[in-house]
Every structure is written in structure tokens, then in C-alpha cells.
Image (tube, rainbow, N blue to C red):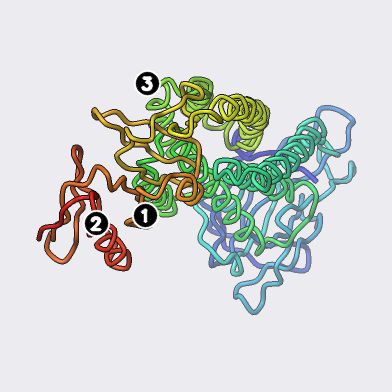
Amino acid sequence: MIVPAASAQAQDMPWQACHGTVGPAGPVLSDCRPIRDFVDPQGRELWLRSAVGAPTDTRPHAFYVAGVASSEAWLNGKRLGVNGQPGATAQAERPGRYQAIFPIRETAWRSGGNTLVLRLSSFHGGLHFARPMSAMVVAPYPYPQRIALLAITFVAAGALLAAAFGFGVIHAMRRTGSSLVLAAMAGVAALQAVVESLRTLFDYAYPLHAWRMSAIWVLAAAFAILLVTYATTRFLPRARGLMVGLALGVVGATALLPGFDVKTVWALILGVALAAVPAAAGVHRHIPGARPTLAWLALFLALALGFPEWLTDLSYFLLAASLVLPLLMVEVVRLGRDARGREAALTRAASRPDRLTVASARGVELVPIAEILAVVGADDYVELRLVGGRTLLHAARLDGLATELPASFLRIHRSVIANLAQVQRLERDGDRWRLHLSEGAPLPVSRSRQPALREALDAPRLGAVSG
């Protein structure tokens, strides 16, 4: 069931707030005063009155009420119906549905003025809503259903679930963290599509609305944080901890904003803006996939800032699908290309045991092992620090490289492998130890790996120790 939104149509009905009781002939109202802002029955019983004109056509009409409240309605003193049971206290109220339709018989209309009375109460909403009532309007019955949008929602949700499964399979086969994040993004967006559709598919009691709106914000915030995680992992892995921490703080702070629509829209806008930072860095570094990702993020921001009501009404998961589904194809193509490149490079490297096959943004290349100073882990990638100040990102994991590199390389930290042939000295820095190589910044040494490092450095021709 879908009811009209309040934005334009409810403004056509000026409401007055009154003192009221139910008499033998219907509601008895007194001391009525115009409501100049919005109707808010939260924490109280509220009597409303409005003058409405009779329909000018022969179509049946109904009084539509949607909001966090129980409701009861009369037209010209005749009771139209009740949704739950409004009351003056929480004990007296019986919660109604979030959406209610009160059909109006043709004989209930008068040729002159008509008086519509609405009794509301809301003691079980759970949270305080900035705009608790989303519709209070007379309109033709039945109200047209937005079947096209609902169909698009289901198609998008199904596609996102398929994408989540596809990325999950890619992660299981290749153990790529980016694929796992994309699977989570697709799953969160699909779940949000389901939650968004509940109002259409399920006539739920109004106390559940707080849970539904909270879930929508939580899922939007989770998608925004996952988007930042994906973009940073793919295009700026060394700053992943910083960017994800910043996203958690900034996106989480939207919980303090008034109104769930505002919370949701700003959670998405801020997440997309933060994700654009590593995407822009990827464009600068010529990383494949960075340019289309940045273009999509820029389009999303332009639409969200220019038409925020679209983002709220049409739901962000449609735009999420437009991002995630192409990324699935890009990921499959990228992994296939990398696999073919590795196979060719491994064939060439079979006769060159002194070279490491490196899959980087520039393709696949053979790097002399002797020129590698250190290997620093960054999730799905490692950073190779080379002689001459050059660095190179390699699509591999630190654990795998630890078994590929020769014995002159030793793991000195959970995220660092050092070339002991390039060591100058090991020295104390306060309560920590640092390993200095022939060039570049010193490397951290974990306490648990220090004995093995000292033993290796004491071996002939591998370096000297001081401190």
C-alpha cells in the first residue's frame, strides 16, 4: 500500500488544533487555532480540524493518513474509521498502522463546506521524529501504485544479490580483499532495497517505523564506509587505516543530525566525498579503474547535492547498483588479465631465478631481487621499496612473498620483510627497535621477532649491530 507524500498535497489542507472530546453526535471541538508549522502528535493526544471541498468528479475518494500515530477520522460528524485507538495516555492508546486509508462514501459529502476531523496520538514511536506525519490528505481511491518503481527496486535488489555472490566467489578463489568489500557493499545495498520496500509490501504498526528508519540510516552509513574502504584499498592502500577511521567518525556523526532523511542523505554524501579522495589519487598514479570510479563518484555527488529529494525518494541503492555491477565486470576482467599476465611472466621468469615477478599498475614486470630493500604489507597489495628510492605496488600478500623470497630476506614485523643484505645497523629508539638499511627510512622491528633478527645479523657477511 502506498499513500501520497505530505510535501505538496498536505499543504492544501490547512489544519487547526483544537480541544476535543467524542460526543453522542460525533466529535465536539473548541478553542481551535491554526497550525502554522507541522502536525506533531508525539507524546500527546491531538485533535485536528480542516475544511475540505467536495470532489468535483464522480471517482471515489479516501482520506489518507501516514505517520507515527494512531488515528481516528470523521467527516461532517460521521465516523470514517479508526486506525488502532488514539488515547490521552500511553495506556489508553492502542498503536495503529503507519499507513491508514479511510474510504469516504459519496453520501458523506455536502454540496457546501465539509469539515474533516482527525484525532491523533503517538506514545509508542520509540524515537522522536522531526516530521512524524508524512501524509494527511484527501485523494482519489485507490491511490495509484508505483508498480514501475517497485519493479525496478526488485530488479536492482536481485542484481545486487547476484553481484554479492559473484564477488564472494572471486574472493574465495583469489582471496582479494577488494572483492570481499565489494561483496559487502552489494549485500548492504540489496538489504537496504528490501528495507525501503517494506512500507509498500507490509502494512506494519507505527512503532516499527523507528526501527525501519534506523535500519535505513545504518545500512546507508555502512555502504558509505565500505565505499571508502574499497576506494582506499584499491587506489591508496597505505592510507587505508586513516581514511577508514575518518569515514567512521564523519559518517557516524550524521546520527546527530535531525531527521532520518537528512541523516541518510548526508551519510551517503560524506562517504562518497571521502571515497573520491583515494580515487583521485589513483587517477594521479594512473591506476586502472580509478578514472571511471572517480567519474561515478562525481556524478553521484552532483545528483545528491543538486537533487537530494531524488536520493531520498528513489533510494540510493539504484545508484549503488549502477556502481557495483560494472565493478563486478571490471573486477572479473582485471583478475583475468592479471592471471594471464602472471602466467606469461612466470614463464619468462623460469630462467631468471634472481627476479621477482611483480604485478603492478603498469602491468607485470621482473624486478631484480637484489634491488629490493624491503617489502611492506598493505592488505591485498605490498609495497616494494627498491634501491634508488623507487617504490612499487605489487598485487600479492606478505605471507605469500615470505615463502618466495630467498633466505636473505627476513620478516622483522607483522607487516615488514627486510633484505638483510642491505642492513646497516639495528638500534634502539626509546623502548622500540629500528632497522636501518643502506637507504630509506628505518623499519620497525617487533619485539617477538628481534631475537631471530639478531641471530641472522650475527651470521657472516650480513651486517653489523649497534645500540
Nearer to us of marks 1 and 2 is: 2
What residue type is disc 2 on?
Leu
Q: Nearer the viewer, residue 426 or 378?
A: 426
Relative depth, front residue between 332 and 106: 332
**Residue 247 relative to residue 136: left or right:** left
Q: Residue furthest front?
A: 460
- On screen, 98 above or below 56? below
Q: Is residue 169 left or right of residue 237?
A: right
Name the quadrant containing residue 147: top right
Q: Residue at x 60, y 46 (%)?
A: 175
Residue 316 at least partly seen: yes
Left or right side of 212 for 358: left
Q: Alpha-carbon neighbours of circle 3 within 10 Å: few (<14), some, or many (≥20)?
A: few
Amino acid, disc 3 = His
Element type where label 2 sits in the image:
helix
The residues tagged by marks 3 and 1 sit, at their Cα atoms, a distance apart of 32 Å
The Cα–Cα distance between marks 2 and 3, rounded to whole angstroms, is 40 Å
**Looking at the image, is mark 2 or mark 3 nearer the viewer?**
2
Residue 411 disc label? 1
Residue marked by disc 2: 457
Q: Quadrant of residue 202?
A: bottom right
Residue 460 placement (x, y as % from top left): 24, 54
Residue 247 at x, y = what percent? 40, 46
Mark 1 is on which residue type?
A: Arg
Q: Residue at x 70, y 68 (%)?
A: 95
- Place of residue 409 in the rendered image (x, y in percent of width and height, measured from the top left): 36, 48
Q: Earlier in the sequence, mark 3 or mark 1?
A: 3
Instruction: First in sequence, mark 2 or 3: give its number.
Output: 3
The CA span between labels 1 and 2 is: 13 Å
Residue indicated by mark 3: 284
